[in-house]
Image: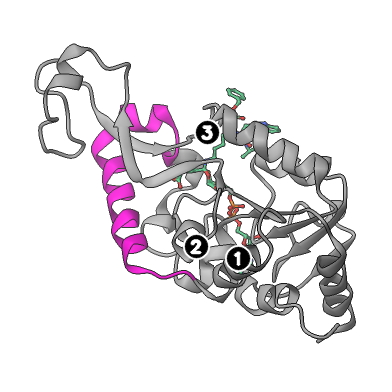
């Protein structure tokens, strides 16, 4: 274990309240592509800012729906990695000592067994109505299609995720801010720190801030320690509480 890793493992042991803010890099070793790293396939053609918006969906609902369909299918096939599992195991050993705040929509923290995950950007496995549903929408099954629509008014189904320009779920965001304000230690794992208000949580953390990321991030300047490594390699070392 490097000196820095050992030091942070000590902070983990001493902290009464830990907040873990995760981003796409948390799931990279499960095989889920990140948003802003070099991308292949669909990701090479579009930036998230161009697809993850209501305007993009209204302009080209089939293309955006298909982008999500490909990602949903891929996410359904992957498994939580050693990082997700180390977090969940820590929470089992220490109930109520670690709060997971995630920007990820893949549900992998939840599948690893983490309780009470605060999912700031929604859940890609679910969908919801694009416009406020009328009686027709709520009483009829949507007609299958890409995207499915209400047979009567044409209202479309859309992924239940948070797009740019949309508000984050109020309860989750408030709970995440509280977790940041009361923590003794925040682990910021696998996020570029480019998207707000999630990234701002690292800047309001009361306690020490540790960034875990193999590459430079926009939150490195907010960190007391930056650990250059991956989530699946480092989180087990930080959270497994060896002899210390
Ligand atoms: C590894 C690794 C390994 C690789 N281990 N690490 C303040 C300032 C400026 C702008 C704004 C601001 N406040 C709000 C805004 C506007 C906007 C915003 O932030 N824009 C920025 C781009 C500038 N924010 C919003 O619009 C938000 N809403 C909002 O603020 O509402 C209020 C409001 C309303 C109206 C007007 C104004 C305000 C909503 C943001 C929603 C983001 N949604 C998405 C898509 C979700 C659905 C989907 O999946 O399609 O969320 S965008 C995308 O980015 C996704 C992610 O959750 C999010 C963050 O990305 P993340 O997780 O950091 O991934 P990457 O790819 O960027 O980084 C991966 C990292 O992992 C890298 O650093 C790698 O090095 C690392 N890594 N392998 C560890 N193995």
Q: Which of the numbered marks, if any, corresponds to residue 113?
A: 2
State which quadrant residue 18 falls in. Answer: bottom right
- Mark nearest the camera among 2 and 3 is 2
* SS at badge 3: loop
- Please tell me whether the stretch drawn in magenta is mainly helix, strand or loop: helix
Quadrant observed for ligand 1 in the rendered image: top right
Tell me if mark 3 has few (under 14), some (14-19) or many (20+) residues whose alpha carbon lies within 10 angstroms of its own: some
Image x and y of residue 230, in percent? 65, 74
Image-based side of 16 in relation to 201, left or right: right
What scheme was used to colour the molecule?
one colour
Please provide the residue range marked out in magenta: 51-80
Query: Residue 155: within the magenta?
Result: no
Q: Quadrant of the N terminus?
A: bottom right
Tell me the SS state at disc 2: loop
Query: Is residue 197 visible to us here?
Result: no
Label 3 beta carbon within 8 A of ligand 1:
yes
Left/right of residue 63 with respect to residue 92 in the rendered view: left
Instruction: State the residue position of label 3.
Output: 164
Looking at the image, tell me whether mark 2 or mark 1 is earlier in sequence order: 1
Give the tally of numbered discs: 3
Is there any visible trace of residue 93 in the rendered image? yes
Q: Residue 31 versus residue 6: which sits nearer the camera?
A: 6
Q: Residue at x 72, y 79 (%)?
A: 237
Label annotation for residue 131: none
Who comes first in sequence, dot 2 or dot 3? 2
Q: Earlier in the sequence, mark 1 or mark 3?
A: 1
Whether the magenta-drawn stretch holds residue 58 is answered as yes
Q: CA distance from mark 2 to mark 1?
A: 9 Å
> Which residue corresponds to mark 1?
92
Q: Position of residue 80 (x, y in %)?
A: 47, 69
């Amino acid at each position: 274990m490097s000196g820095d890793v050992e030091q942070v493992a000590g902070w983990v042991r001493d902290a009464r309240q830990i907040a873990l803010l995760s981003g796409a890099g948390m799931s990279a070793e499960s095989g889920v592509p990140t948003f802003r790293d070099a991308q292949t396939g669909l990701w090479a053609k579009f930036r998230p800012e161009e697809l993850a918006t209501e305007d993009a969906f209204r302009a080209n609902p089939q293309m955006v729906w298909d982008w999500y369909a490909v990602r949903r299918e891929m996410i359904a096939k992957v498994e939580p990695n050693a990082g997700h599992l180390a977090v969940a195991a820590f929470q089992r050993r220490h109930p109520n000592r670690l709060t997971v705040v995630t920007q990820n929509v893949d549900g992998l923290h939840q599948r690893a067994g983490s309780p009470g995950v605060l999912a700031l950007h929604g859940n890609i496995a679910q969908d919801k109505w694009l416009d406020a549903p009328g009686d027709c929408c709520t009483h009829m099954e949507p007609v299958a299609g890409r995207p499915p629509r209400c047979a009567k008014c044409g209202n479309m189904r859309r992924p239940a995720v948070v797009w740019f320009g949309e508000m984050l779920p109020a309860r989750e965001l408030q709970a995440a801010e509280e977790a940041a304000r009361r923590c003794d230690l925040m682990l910021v794992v696998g996020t570029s720190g480019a998207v707000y208000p999630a990234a701002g949580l690292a800047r309001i953390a009361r306690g020490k801030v540790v960034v875990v990321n193999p590459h430079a991030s926009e939150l490195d300047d907010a960190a007391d320690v930056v650990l250059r490594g991956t989530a699946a390699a480092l989180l087990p070392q930080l959270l497994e509480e060896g002899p210390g």
